[in-house]
Image: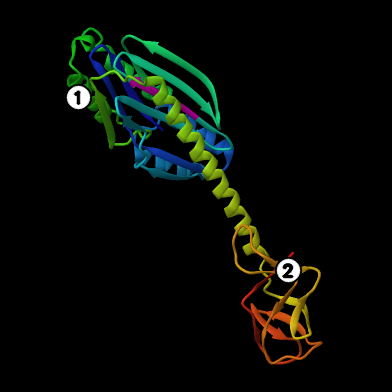
Amino acid sequence: MSVIIGYYGKNGAVIAGDRRNILFRGDPKKREELEKKLYSGELKSDEELIRAAKDLGINIHIDDEKIKVRKIEDVLVGEVSSIGAESKRRRMYITKGKCAIIDILNDTITNKSIREGSSIVVFGNKYIKNLVQQELVKYKNKILKMSILEIKNLFEEILKNCNNPTVSKKYDVFYTVNCSKNFEETIENDIKDLFNYRNELNKKMFEFGKIMTIVNKIANEGEIGTIKNGKLVLNDDHIAIDKVCPNPKLFTEIEVEGNFEDGDIVVIENGNMKIKGKNENITTKYIVCKK
């Protein structure tokens, strides 16, 4: 769900990209059928896409706020991506007279090519690429004579006329008339930032997973322990923590408050801690979980 057009030449560089991102949820075979209709150009509008998705029982979410092109000093960057079981990205980096195309799978660069001179690069699904290239062909003898602002205006016009449910009405355009003095270094640093971001994201997801595991283990029914020497000594299948976090402190016996005696069995009923067989609630600052 993308279209990105990049130009680089002796007069500078221009990049333009839409903002559409579509999420699909449902049966994989039905989803594949919907995507085939979408990428073949059979579906001509958002309404047709929504109707086709409904007919196939596929839930879709259309978002037109995904930024796909940006500018780092005199380097213009565009990215299309597919995020599923694996993260696949294709990036173009362009500056005056230079272009780099880089394919990234998860945290590995699988392909990198550097080009110099003048050319136009188009990212997108096959149908959209054909539409864009049909428009560009009309100007093939003029583009090299155009100014950067004229090329910018041309790319904007092409995006405006891409009436297809894989492309948003919103778009972003950047340009430069300068050649980056640190082209490859800028690329290297930008990809390093991506890998660092993914690493931090993976850490957060791992920590979030640990937190959710703890939340799902919080005891809310059944016997949890016995009062001994004025404290609650937990059964072998329970543990207490000081707080819900990725690495809480663990306790096998904890302080409690209330009306109790040694030997009392402590239970949790409907989330409330009580003395078994008595109508006595007790409290603690700790959180009791199943092991």
* Quadrant housing residue 126: top left
* Quadrant housing residue 92: top left
Given residues 252 and 100, the one toward you in this image is: 252
Residue 254 appears in view: yes
| Element at label 1 | helix
**Main secondary structure of the magenta stretch:** strand
* Quadrant housing residue 189: top left
Residue 23 pos. (x, y %): 46, 42
Which amino acid, mark 2? Ile
- Label ID, residue 239: 2
| Earlier-in-chain disc, 2 versus 1 | 1
Given residues 264 and 55, the one toward you in this image is: 264
Q: Residue at x 38, y 43 (%)?
A: 63
Q: Judge from the rendering whether residue 233 lies leftward or rightward of residue 287; answer left or right.
A: right
- Label ID, residue 153: 1
Given residues 98 and 275, the one toward you in this image is: 98
Q: Which residues are magenta?
A: 89-94
Q: Residue at x 48, y 18 (%)?
A: 112
Which amino acid, mark 1? Asn
Q: Nearer the viewer, mark 2 or mark 1?
A: 2
